[in-house]
Image (cartoon, rainbow, N blue to C red):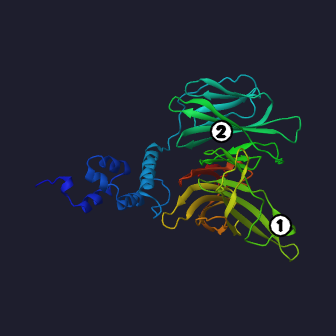
Amino acid sequence: MELRRLDTLPLEIISRILCFLGARDVVKFRLVSKLFHSITYDSVIWKTIYANARFPRPPGPFSFQSIRFLEQTLIRSERLEECWTTQPMQAVSSTQIRLQGSALGQPRIIDARWLITFESYRQIVFHDIETRSRQVLWEETGLVTFWDVTSVTSTGGLSVYVVFRKNTKDIWRASWRLLEFRVHGESGHLSYSVSLDVPTGTRYLGGSVCLISDNTPFLYIMGQDLVFDTRTRTFYEFPEFGTQLVEIHAHQLFVAPRRVLLTNTHIIVVSYHTQRLAVPSSAVELTLIQAFVLPEDRPAGNSTAVLRLSHEGITPDHLANLALTRNSTIDSITEFTSLRFLRLQPESNRLHFSCVDLTLPRSHSNIILALSIDVNDIFTVESGIHDPIMSPTGYHIEASDDGHVRGFCRNRAENNNANTS
């Protein structure tokens, strides 16, 4: 029997063979020759491999998902599948870190490597867990009362941001500051980058400090209700509340606390409203979702800019407890932006999980466009806990921004023993 060289086979046959390989095997095959290199960029191959894959991955393949996205997602998922195990975890090592002076609040761990503490109410200290080194990166002259820290990964590498509130003589006008530190390569050395005064204006929104990034280029400073763009180092505030969807009068509307969700393209604000009707003792529950974008013109100097309302939508569904599970995906043809969230809805001793999809048309100038809200139920879990939200030990959900969601929910078996699913 005569054996034929692979490069003499028809291209359709080679493409068909590649559809049965894994993503990393196809990438290796790409290095053999120029011919094979061009074949491996066939969209049909990657869509077939993606559709037939048997490991966790974001939904797809869709027309708006590029070959690069499918390839990188499959490679990450293959590596995750190899590492995924049901075996119990074992302690590999332990490190004891001794703090110097009293620590303010709970220490924070960033990127599974650095333990960050605010010691003696004045010093920001980074402890490298791997090398056991200690760095004092900032020393404040005044007394700090609240602080928080988060990290942002960009093309320039990893940056660490710290925000803190410092008391002044006027207890109603505290001073806020935002610090940026850069991480240098594999050495893990951190260095001070910039210090910015957080604009407070006349706002007093309580003493709590919380910094949220959600794997986006933005920071949300809870306590001052500000958005910070880490790329341009610009602060943004929200415009005065208003909506064009329904006619709402102040005496007809009760506005509950809102939720701010960050994405790569939009800042999403979810607010819950009770609109009182003309009939006595009757009202309608509404969830208003508004999307904001950065204004086209940046402010001069250090002034604070105002976000622009670009989209809004309203639904009778109570969309509380949302977690971003798929970040901004832009359709190359329609230029619509798609976002996906996981919703957790408690009801008595049950937990309802549903998928919330937002579709935002491309925004032009100052026109406010309608966004579509699509809610689809996924499943319901018997939690065995009367009020799951008030009992945080009853469940824990971790959602990535590329489609993966994992977690646990404690339920009750017939013998009243707790199980985890």
Residue positioned 77% across, 47% down in the render: 224
Give the labeled residue for mark 2.
161
**C-alpha separation, residue under disc 1 versus residue under disc 2:** 37 Å
| Placement of 122 over or under 165, stated as above or below | above
Q: Quadrant of residue 240?
A: bottom right
- Name the N-terminal-most of marks 1 and 2: 2
Image coordinates of residue 159 in percent, x first then y, are 60, 38
Image coordinates of residue 147 in percent, x first then y, are 74, 37
- Mark 1 burial class by Cα count in 10 Å: few <14, some 14-19, many 20+: some
Mark 1 vs mark 2: give the one in front: 2
Instruction: Determine whether the residue tagged by mark 1 lies in a helix, strand or loop.
Output: strand
For residue 385, which numbered disc appears in the image?
none
**Could you tell me the amino acid type at mark 2?**
Tyr
Q: Residue furthest left?
A: 1
Q: Is residue 273 visible?
A: yes
Image coordinates of residue 343 in percent, x first then y, are 64, 59
For residue 253, which numbered disc appears in the image?
1
Residue 246 in the figure: left or right of residue 19: right
Q: Quadrant of residue 241?
A: bottom right
Residue 22 in the figure: left or right of residue 388: left
